[in-house]
Image: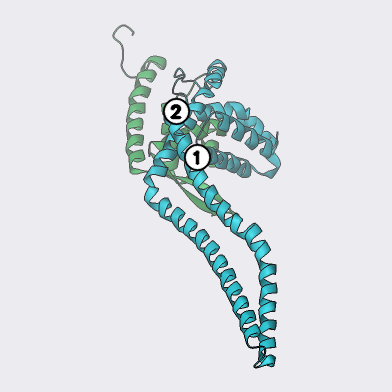
Amino acid sequence: MNKLEFLTRLRNSLEKGGLPKEDINDALTYYEEVFLDAGFGKEEETAASMGAPEDVAVNILRESGIRADTAPVMPPQDSNAQNFSNNTAAQPAKKTSGGQWALRIVLAVLTFPIWLPILIVICALLFTLIVVVCSLIFAAVITAISLIAGGIAAIFETPSIALMLIGVGLIITGIIMLICKPAFNTFIPACGRAIKRFFNRVAGFFKKGEKENV
Amino acid sequence: MGFSINAGLLDAMVLSIVQNNDTYGYEITQYLRKAVDISESTLYPVLRRLQKNELLETYDKEFMGRNRRYYRITPQGNDSLEEYREEWRSHKKKIDSILLNEGAESNEQT
């Protein structure tokens, strides 16, 4: 077994045992260091001297208080005891994940004054974008109409200027027609969907939280 | 070796090694191996326990382009080690008195 295999199996066993991530990383750092300090050519030998990663994990779990509902067995060399705690080690994992949920909810409530304003600002920004795009298009439409109308009105007095006005008006109309399609079909709905998704996520979070609490 | 080492004794020995010199996991194991047959994986839970009880603390030091975790004894660790040493002295005396027929001469024997 080489270093990578040992560390991977150790990580898997610790994760299965429900050890907090921080503690898992600490353990892996330690064991990686052991391999590095033992020397490059000695990976197999080092792994062999430490025994099966699964047994190593059981010892770590027991030391981290995951032995809570296991009988307190002292000698770590006792293989029967190890098997025993191996079977029960999987149970507290569910409990901790429930606890983590509760923690997340408490955190969400406590940080309420922070994330609520952020949420409102993001929604307001998206909404502003929609309004800005709409008003730009509206302004362009008005400009085009007045240019063309003005051109038609002045066509007999100053035909040269009138023709220019009508021309510019038609150009703007063309640009509006080009812009409108992507704007109304994709951009504005996208902003709308983003706002909706934000609210759904918040709502979903609280719904899950309630279920978990009951 | 037929004698087993219990957790308390292991804690005390690790504290003593770290008190002499700040050191890292692998070196602690090598030291301990002079006296007892233990592996790196026996040592890790011990270090972790001592750390959680604030008898040891860690810091990272660069070594050949990577970080090595060094252990340092805390004031509580020093106190605890002193207690362990005191306890060991009296324990050793009692054992010796029986095993080596030393010290406390029992009135029965001549």
Please check whether the numbered discs 1 and 2 fall on a single chain: yes
Is residue B48 among what the camera can see? Answer: no
Q: Secondary structure at mark 1?
A: helix
The residue shown at (33%, 19%) is B103
Colour convention: by chain
Is residue A108 among what the camera can see? Answer: yes
Residue located beneath label 2 in the image: A65
Given the image, what chain letter belongs to the residue carrying mark 2?
A
The x, y position of residue A141, in whole percent, is 60, 72
Residue located beneath label 1 in the image: A204
Given the image, what chain letter belongs to the residue carrying mark 1?
A
The residue shown at (31%, 14%) is B105
Left or right, A134 with reference to B49: right
Observer-nearest of A12 and A32: A12
Chain represented in cyan? A
The x, y position of residue B83, in whole percent, is 32, 32
Observer-nearest of A189 and B20: A189
